[in-house]
Image (spheres, rainbow, N blue to C red):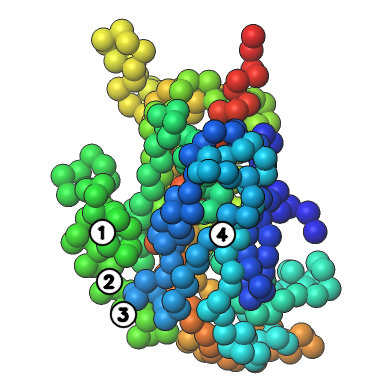
Amino acid sequence: MSGNTFGKLFKVTTFGESHGTAMGCVIDGCPAGLELSVDDIEKELIRRRPGAVYGSRDEKDSPEILSGVFEGKTLGSPIAIIVRNSNQNSKDYDEIKDIYRPGHADYTWEAKYGIRDHRGGGRSSGRETLCRVAAGAVAKKFLALQGITIRAWTSSIAGIDQPSPNEDDFDFEEIERNPFHVPGKSGAEKAAAKIEELRAEGESAGGVITCLVTGVPIGLGEPVFEKLDACLAAAVISIGACKGVEFGAGFAAANMKGSENNDKPCEDGKGKFATNNCGGILGGISSGQDIVFRAAFKPTPSISKPQKVLERDGGVKEIAIKGRHDVCIVPRAVPVVEAMTALVLADFLLLSRCAKV
């Protein structure tokens, strides 16, 4: 199987199945001398753990650093990180080993490989994202030294839109205070009520995550086929439940005039722009403005409401998917979006150092 390694210079390989012994990643290309501890990784993993409003799992996800770090600093050698699986109930999946769950990769995976791990989805499980978050924690530490900050939040959940940064009730601090990672207390209360309503119905919901990157220097990106926005989009849409990504004005730009969409320079002569419809990227190269994009996530496909499913023998029957599934995975995807963004930017930052003499 290919496709488990990401990046060119700052390279990450993830491994493990959701109900196997452990999940983990190997990071190759991280510069030496970066201060790194288990706490740096664990605090990011805690942000993607399921909360009481999502499901009943208690995933501690305690990381172990096996190599690449000595006396609190990276050595420049491969960094291996594992998280041992300790809260998996494989018996929950016994009833689905001969069916293909709707909305999951069960059917396509088995058609491609001729075999699949039905226990939680194996490599196609959302649990794989903990490997990305662990690697992203390292990338974030590296980017912080360069003055680059990545912040994502839930901007829409279960059809409930949240305030944007230019509105009075938007609060960056509130994002980490509530389990939905929304930027306002009232928005969190509305989301909680809606999620409980869906849970009672045996249903699920999707949503949108907005990501804001500040401190990005001008010049990151490698045209023509390695444009920064193209690589960010590929990285984010590689997250299992992500179905769409847009930068800046995004799809709204299709209804604008050129004079409306073109970002106008400020009059102060300092190379700043009054608007950011481009989302901080022009021609696939960072413009020095904040990078802003949004990612759409589909509803959790495993729901307790009865659904028709395809059987291995070609038949169709109706079942309710059992197990401990999140009503909405969007809040848990917030640190995953940040992690994939960090991995892309770390890679391009290293690549930029060999772009010219």
Residue nearest the observer in this picture, 217 or 155: 217
**Earlier-in-chain disc, 2 versus 4:** 4
Front position among marks 2 and 3: 2
Cβ–Cβ under 8 Å for marks 4 and 3: no
User: Label 2 vs label 4: CA separation?
Assistant: 34 Å
Cβ–Cβ under 8 Å for marks 2 and 4: no
Residue 76, image quadrant: top right
Q: Residue at x 29, y 54 (%)?
A: 175
Above or below for 178 versus 86: above
**Earlier-in-chain disc, 2 versus 3:** 2
Cβ–Cβ under 8 Å for marks 2 and 3: no
Front position among marks 1 and 2: 1
Q: Secondary structure at mark 3?
A: helix
**Earlier-in-chain disc, 1 versus 2:** 1
Task: Tell me the tag on residue 64.
Answer: 4
Q: Residue at x 50, y 65 (%)?
A: 62
Q: Quadrant of the N terminus?
A: bottom right
Task: Tell me the tag on residue 192.
Answer: 2
Q: Residue at x 44, y 31 (%)?
A: 145
The reply to whether residue 179 is in sight is: yes
User: Label 2 vs label 3: CA separation?
Assistant: 9 Å
**Earlier-in-chain disc, 4 versus 3:** 4
Q: Amino acid at mark 2?
A: Ala
Q: Quadrant of the C terminus?
A: top right
Q: Residue 193's x, y, as percent?
A: 25, 74
Q: Residue under circle 1?
A: 177
